[in-house]
């Protein structure tokens, strides 16, 4: 059960949802909005951590931005720091998937003293993933033309709700190793809808110059980097690159997953969470 709380910080008011007990863990995504239904990725940590699921600015009941620069990863990390401080936590850990994982890499490089450990998956350290032939976002990928049609449907005010639902379903299926198991994976209601303003800032302002390879090579926080072997959004080679750049990181590959190993290989993902909990213990 996820409980809502409004946290008043020096950088504004943030809506968070929390569950579980144990060490504090922050979870968010760069452009998603959450509610008391939780979030599939965050749910996997609830048995082992006290999870704080954070709605960033422009999401849910969190404050709006006064300047677009507040939507950047670096400013967002300052917001997470403000939330941590307001909660009275000296340190917490961070878990992020996809652009949430990218945000976690920036967080670990900019605020190393605030994180006990972090885990990032299905991510990339540069914008090169958008050009890779194995990414559905690349014009080199055979599914890219259909994906563009899907985006048109999702953005069209003339599309019916059912058309948008089916388009979103097809997009998600492109990112599953076994798309025929879609109904099984997503049978339980959850949250995480796209916050368009945040997505647009990432896509048109931050992504064109996105390259954090130099920054993450200086990270010294205990970390796990994970990826589905057949990831069609941020292909495997980009998680492998992150692992090679982050000193001392542990690299875990999910052999029968695409972009959602927390759903596609739940048991193995749970084992990874246990390893994450033990990471850095005794150091």
Image (spheres, rainbow, N blue to C red):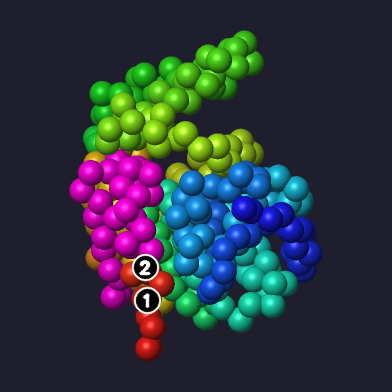
Say which element carries label 1: helix
How many numbered discs? 2
Q: Is residue 60 visible?
A: yes
* Residue 196 drawn above or below residue 110: above
**Residue at the image position 40 percent from the left and 37 percent from the top:** 185
Q: Is residue 142 left or right of residue 186?
A: left
Q: Quadrant of residue 10?
A: bottom right
The residue nearer to you, when weighing 12 against 193, is 193
Say which element carries label 2: helix
Please give the residue where the numbered disc 2 appears in the rendered image: 274
Residue interval drawn in magenta: 247-273
Residue 207 position, x and y percent, is: 46, 46
The residue nearer to you, when weighing 162 against 194, is 162
Q: Is residue 241 visible?
A: no
Gap between marks 2 and 1 measured at Cα? 7 Å
* Residue 144 drawn above or below residue 77: above
**Residue at the image position 33 percent from the left and 62 percent from the top:** 272
Specify few, some or many for label 2: CA neighbours under 10 Å numbering under 14, 14-19, or 20 or more: few
Q: Is residue 76 left or right of residue 95?
A: right
Instruction: Say the numbered circle drawn on residue 136.
Output: none
Label 2 close to label 1 by CB (< 8 Å): yes
| Magenta run includes residue 235 | no
Instruction: Say the numbered circle drawn on residue 278.
Output: 1
**Residue at the image position 20 percent from the left and 48 percent from the top:** 255
The residue nearer to you, when weighing 126 against 42, is 42
Q: Quadrant of residue 143?
A: top left
């Amino acid at each position: 059960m996820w409980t809502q709380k409004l946290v008043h910080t020096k950088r504004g008011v943030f809506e968070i949802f929390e569950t579980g007990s144990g060490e504090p863990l922050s979870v968010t995504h760069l452009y998603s909005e959450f509610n008391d239904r939780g979030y599939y990725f965050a749910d996997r940590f609830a048995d082992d951590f006290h999870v704080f699921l954070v709605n960033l600015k422009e999401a849910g009941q969190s404050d709006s931005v006064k300047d677009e620069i507040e939507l950047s990863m670096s400013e967002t990390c300052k917001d997470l720091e403000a939330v941590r401080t307001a909660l009275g936590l000296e340190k917490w850990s961070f878990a992020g998937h996809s652009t949430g994982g990218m945000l976690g890499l920036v967080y670990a490089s900019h605020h190393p003293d605030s994180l006990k450990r972090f885990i990032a998956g299905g991510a990339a350290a540069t914008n090169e993933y958008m050009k890779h032939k194995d990414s559905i976002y690349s014009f080199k990928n055979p599914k890219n033309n259909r994906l563009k049609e899907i985006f048109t449907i999702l953005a069209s005010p003339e599309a019916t709700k059912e058309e948008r639902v089916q388009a979103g379903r097809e997009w998600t299926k492109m990112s599953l190793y076994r798309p025929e198991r879609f109904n099984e994976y997503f049978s339980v209601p959850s949250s995480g809808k796209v916050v368009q303003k945040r997505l647009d800032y990432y896509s048109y302002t931050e992504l064109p110059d996105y390259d954090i390879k130099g920054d993450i090579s200086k990270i010294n926080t205990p970390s796990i980097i994970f990826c589905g072997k057949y990831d069609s959004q941020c292909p495997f080679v980009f998680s492998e690159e992150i692992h090679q750049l982050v000193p001392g990181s542990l690299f875990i590959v999910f052999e029968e997953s695409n972009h959602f190993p927390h759903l596609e290989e739940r048991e193995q993902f749970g084992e990874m969470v246990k390893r994450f909990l033990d990471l850095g213990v005794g150091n």
